[in-house]
Amino acid sequence: MSEQPTARVYNTRHQPRPYTPGRRRVSVYVAWSYPAESGADPLKLDNRFSTMPEVRRVTWPAYEKPEFADPMRFQQTIAGTLELFFWAWTPFQDFTAETTGHPVAMYQRVDQAGFTTPLDERILADTDTLFVFGLDHMVTGQEASSEEIEAVRAWAGREGNRLVLGPHHDVGADDDLTVRNMEYLHHGDALVPRQQRFGRYTRSLMEGLGVPVENRYGLRPAVREPGKIAALNIDRDLDERGWLTGVETFNFHMHLPHYAVTGGDEKSVRVLGRQPIDLARPHPFTEAGNTEFNMFLWLPAAGERGGEILMADSTIFSTLFGADDSLRNFWRNIVTK
C-alpha cells in the first residue's frame, strides 16, 4: 500500500455535508470498541484479531516493508492489524468521494482515543447511505441501545435512505471442538482461530429493526483460478433496482458469512447473490447439502420503512482482498442508485 495522497486528519470533528440532489452522502459506522479489540489478550487463542507479528508471519513477505514492519512507524500489536482495515477502506472512501462529490464519514463506536459515538442523529442527519460494519467480537459486548434502534428506525423510514448492514462471520459457534476444527480446516486461514464470533452490535440492531436475517459460519468461496473467486449466482429477475448491474464477482475472502433468512418471503427479503462454496473442503453447512451461501440481500422499502436495506459483508468494501472493475461497479451501484 502506498502513502496517502492527502494529509491525514484524525482528531477532529465531522463537518456536516449539505444535501445535494442526486449525490448521496455516505457514512460508515464501524461497530467496534477499538480499545477493547486492540487490548484483547494475545495469549488467548479465540475471539480476537491477530497481532501484526502473526499477520507478518502468516502472510510473509507481504508486510515486511518498513511502513509495516518497523515498530517505530507501525504498531506491532493488535492495534496495527486494526489499522490495516483503515488502510484498505481508503480506496473505497476515495472512490465514493469522487463518485458522489461528498467525503465519506468514517465513524467508530469507540475510537482509538476512547471517544464513544453512538449511532444517533449526529451521524444520521447528513447521511443518505449508511454502512454498518459488524466487526465487533461478540465477547466485547457491543449492543445497540433502544435509543439507537429508534433513531435508525426513524432514519430508515425516510424514502430514499439506504442502510447497508455487514455483520461479519460467525466461526466456531458449535460447542463440539471437532466441528470447530472442521470449520477451521474448511476456510484455511491460519489467522482466524477455531472460534471467532462477530457482530453482536449488528445483530442487535437487526433484531430491533425486525430484519429477519442472521450471519452464520465463515465459508470459503469456490474459485475459478487461484485467488479468483467463482462468479456469483445472481437472480437478475429479482434485482429490479439493478444493484448487480455490471457485476459478476466480488473479491475473494477465505471466510464469508452466510446471511441466513429466518423469516419474511421472497418479496420482502430478496437473495440477489449466492456464492458457490469450495466443496473440496468439508463443512457442516455443505454436509447438510448446501452448495452456495447467501452473499448479497436486498430488503425493499415496505410498510412504514421508506428506505431500503442491503446486506453485504464489509470485506467487499476492503482492498485487502483485491478490487477489480466488477467490484467497483458494485460500489458505484450502491452509492449512486
Image (cartoon, rainbow, N blue to C red):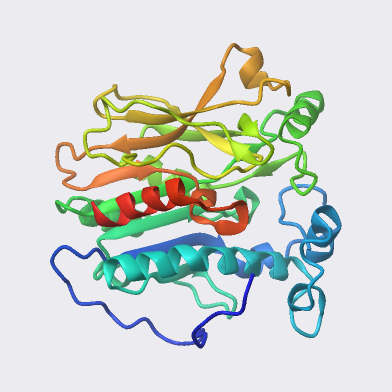
Please tell me whether residue 29 is drawn above or below residue 226 in the rendered image.
below
Residue in the picture at 70% in, 70% down: 79
Residue in the picture at 59% in, 69% down: 87
Q: How many marks?
A: 0
Q: Measured from the top left, where is residue 264 in percent x and y?
A: 30, 25
Please tell me whether residue 192 is drawn above or below residue 52 in the rendered image.
above
57 relative to 253 in the view: left or right:
right
Could you tell me which quadrant the N terminus lies in?
bottom right
Residue in the picture at 25% in, 77% down: 17
Please tell me whether residue 136 is drawn above or below residue 85 in the rendered image.
above
Q: Measured from the top left, where is residue 239 in percent x and y?
A: 27, 32
The reply to whether residue 56 is in sight is: yes
68 relative to 217 in the view: left or right:
right
Picture quadrant of residue 43: bottom right
2 relative to 333 in the view: left or right:
right
Relative to the observer, which residue lies in front, 5 or 34?
Answer: 5
Relative to the observer, which residue lies in front, 240 or 308?
Answer: 240
Residue in the picture at 74% in, 78% down: 67
Picture quadrant of residue 20: bottom left
Picture quadrant of residue 187: top right
Q: Measured from the top left, where is residue 337 in percent x and y?
A: 23, 51
Q: Measured from the top left, where is residue 33 in percent x and y?
A: 57, 65
The reply to whether residue 119 is in sight is: no
Please tell me whether residue 70 is drawn above or below residue 277 in the rendered image.
below
